Image (cartoon, rainbow, N blue to C red):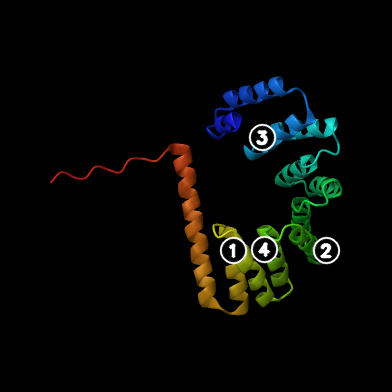
Amino acid sequence: MLGIAYGQLKRSDQSRQAFAQLVRAGGDKPQLHLLLGKAYLDLYDNPKAQEELQKAIAGDPKLPFAHYDLGVLYRRLGQPDKAEEEFDKEMTISPTEPWAFEDRAELRHEQGDVDRAIPLFHRALALNPRCAAALAGLGRASLHRGQPEEAISYLKRAVALEPDSAKFHYQLGQAYLKKGEHAEAKKEFAEQQRLQARAVEKDSDRIFGRLPLPAEPAP
């Protein structure tokens, strides 16, 4: 946690010192490399994330979540073939976890293979009924198939689970628009813009700090 905190403050040297101390304290174990890989992944230090995740897999090729995290990294780097391979391995290693099924479905959907994406979204949802991203994926797939009413049903459930997701509100707005419900679409797009503006403000506060209010003018 200390290493991640330093990383979020852009104090990279201190972050890596904390992570190095973690390895010294815990030993050169695959589980620790997975932990470090996930930390670097969260910090968007992609080269270090890849290095640590590959060490974790080299130490234990069947370590749960290692292939999944590496797949997330490859997807981020725009290497879908490698991402698919890692997600496929994770689905075999962790068949009761929804995340690899969900991300594999997302990749298929992005590649236009909607018919093969849908069963994977359903599989993720069967494993975790509160998997909002899988619900949203089914909503997008329904919209792609020209079924806006079904899309609205899925996307409303996704929004109910994650009301602060600007992306889900936007997708729901698109579904309403496709159905011809312009007033509802307008509401969703307005909420999307509000949430995006709030996210930008939070990022600004995190990076620069919250500025004090201006002094009141003298009477």
Give the spatial CA distance, label 3 vs label 1: 29 Å
Residue 32 vs residue 62: left or right? left
SS state under label 4: helix
The mark that comes first in sequence, 2 or 3, is: 3
Q: Report, in whole angstroms, how far the alpha carbon at label 1 lies from the one at label 2.
A: 24 Å
Q: Nearer the viewer, mark 1 or mark 2?
A: 1
Is the residue marked by circle 1 packed among few (<14), some (14-19), or many (20+) residues within 10 Å?
many
Spatial separation of the CA atoms under disc 2 and disc 3? 32 Å
Q: Is residue 82 above or below residue 59?
A: below
Residue 143: percent from left, percent from top: 69, 71
* Residue for badge 3: 40
Residue lying at the far left of the rendered structure:
219
- Horizontal relation, residue 160 to residue 204: left or right: right
- Going by the numbered disc 2, the residue's amino acid type is Arg
- Which numbered disc, 2 or 4, marks the residue that appears first in the sequence? 2
Amino acid at the residue labelled 3: Tyr
Q: Which mark is residue 116?
A: 2
In the rendered image, which residue does mark 4 sit on?
A: 136
Q: What x and y, as percent, mark residue 46?
A: 69, 36
- How many residues crowd mark 2 within 10 Å: few (<14), some (14–19), many (20+)? few
Q: Amino acid at mark 4?
A: Ala
- For disc 1, the marked residue is 159
